[in-house]
Image (tube, rainbow, N blue to C red):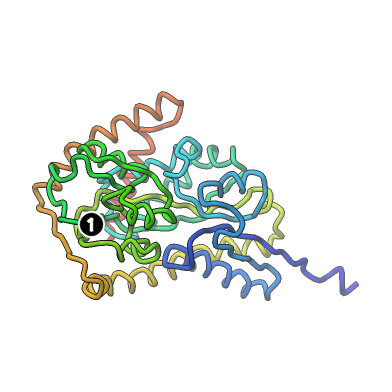
Amino acid sequence: MSFALEASATEWNVSVWGKRRAFTEHVEKLAELVSEKTGGEFTMNVSYGGLSKNRENLDGISIGAFEMAQFCAGYHRDKNRVITVLELPFLGVENLEQEVAVSAAVYAHPAATEEMAQWNAKLLMTSPMPQYNLVGTGDPRSTLADFEGMRVRATGGIGNAFSAVGGVPTSVTATEAYQAMESGVVDTVAFAQHAHLSFGTINQADWWTANLNPGTVNCPVVVNIDAYEALSDEHRAALDSSVPEAIEHYLTNYASLLERWDSVLEEKGVQKVEIDAGVIEEFRAKAADPIRDQWIADMEAQGLPGQELYDLVAKTLADAKGGS
């Protein structure tokens, strides 16, 4: 009788990549919180590359190879078209709290839910990242003319933005970026600050653009729908209620990284380059509107509510800025 009353243990495998860093802190915190709330009955084993390659995490979720995973939209844009609205260049997101707000709004849209369900995936939470900026070798690139022919590691909308001004984007994965830079396959790499640190590109850099801010990438954490629905009510409640706490932990942790970023640049001898406001405006004019309009047209042609999704992002962002 006592055996029958015991809660059944649940063990989930979680596929991420690289090493533990600011980008994975909410996943680590989620695992910690869920275990605490269930008295150790619901545990998560976070694997850094041991379960799958980063470009194959969504496929792994779809076949139930593991229960939870992190991926980035730019790795397979055809599989997650809806959330690529969050990767459009120059959306105007100013901080991580705004990034959380716009991601949550898009993740909750029926079109996003339906598209992810095709992969047996449920969007659980975002991995909010600040605006990307470039590190590069040689002389700083600070004008649009400098971007002409520039080989840049950039995915998604950021890659499209650099293409619009004559750059040559390549979408090597984050784990391949250092080698691509070291071997001269790329001249520059677009990353958020934590990734320049984690993947070593800052160690190859001569300079860093402090304020180019062309956009960011969107990297959700998803769970396998069958695994989620198989959870007991208690375990599902523990998981769902831990998401806001995990995101809050992530934001606090990332803020401390940003505070020490200038000292990192100084320590590594990397020049901080401020791009002229006129250059940024020229970049925005060439990249933002045409890429947004093309994205909306492409989505609508595929039967997806492109305009509605873009408008949702714009409205959510305006509300977030109004409340900040």
Q: Residue at x 45, y 55 (%)?
A: 126
- Note whether 18 is above or below 188 in the view shown: below
Q: Residue at x 15, y 48 (%)?
A: 280
Residue 302 position, x and y percent, is 45, 26
Residue 293 position, x and y percent, is 28, 31
User: Which of the 4 quarters of the picture holds residue 129?
Assistant: bottom left
Residue at the limit of the structure toward the right, as seen here: 1
- Note whether 114 is above or below 250 in the view shown: above
In front of the other: 195 or 231? 195
In front of the other: 30 or 263? 263
In front of the other: 256 or 207? 207
Residue at the limit of the structure toward the top, as seen here: 301
Q: Is residue 237 left or right of residue 262?
A: right
- Which amino acid, mark 1? Thr
Q: Residue at x 34, y 53 (%)?
A: 183
Residue 189 position, x and y percent, is 30, 53
Q: Is residue 156 left or right of residue 65?
A: left
Residue at the limit of the structure toward the front, as seen here: 183
- Note whether 205 is above or below 289 in the view shown: below
**Residue position marked by numbered label 1 in the rendering:** 137
Crowding around mark 1 (Cα neighbors within 10 Å: few <14, some 14 to 19, many 20+) is: some
In front of the other: 271 or 35? 271
